[in-house]
Image: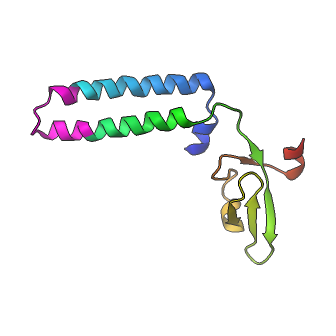
Amino acid sequence: MDRLISEMKREERSKAIEYLKTYRKLDENLHNSAPIDSVSYYATDKCLKYWDMAIKALQAIPSAEPKTGHWIIIDDCEYFIAKCSECGRREDSRMISLYPYCHCGAKMVDPQESEG
């Protein structure tokens, strides 16, 4: 999911934010019309918090092109340890073989590709 969001174009991200704001407004209207002691009031209150979190998360994503990096092997054993060339995060080979992205959002490529 993080990779999908980080690869969104600025226009797509803006549309997604507007979509979330529209549904947040609908929940806000339900929240404001529900009696304070009702289940609907508390359910929509929680939903409003989740809408706000989703909107903030989308807004916080930088609009720059996705960065690329590569794994630098730092300990060569049965399950070798490597670190990300962008953020320095360390992972073992079992994890990096499953995911083509680091947690920092850098797409992991061959070292010759990231230099050029």
Region of the chain picked out in magenta, as a range: 30-45
Q: Residue at left 39%, top 35%?
A: 52
Q: Is residue 32 magenta?
A: yes
18 lies left or right of 7 = left
63 lies left or right of 20 = right
Is 24 placed above or below 38 here?
Answer: above
Q: How many numbered marks are there?
A: 0
In what quadrant of the picture does the N terminus appear? top right
- Here the colouring is rainbow
Is 12 placed above or below 111 here?
Answer: above
Is 40 placed above or below 98 here?
Answer: above
Q: Residue at left 66%, top 54%?
A: 99
Residue 47 found in image quarter = top left
96 lies left or right of 74 = left
Using the image as rendered, state which of residue 19 and residue 74 is in the foreground. 74
Which secondary structure type mostly characterizes the magenta part of the structure? helix
Q: Residue at left 68%, top 50%?
A: 101
Q: Residue at left 79%, top 53%?
A: 70
Q: Is residue 24 magenta?
A: no
Q: Position of residue 42 (x, y in %)?
A: 19, 41
Residue 96 found in image quarter = bottom right
In what quadrant of the picture does the C terminus appear? top right
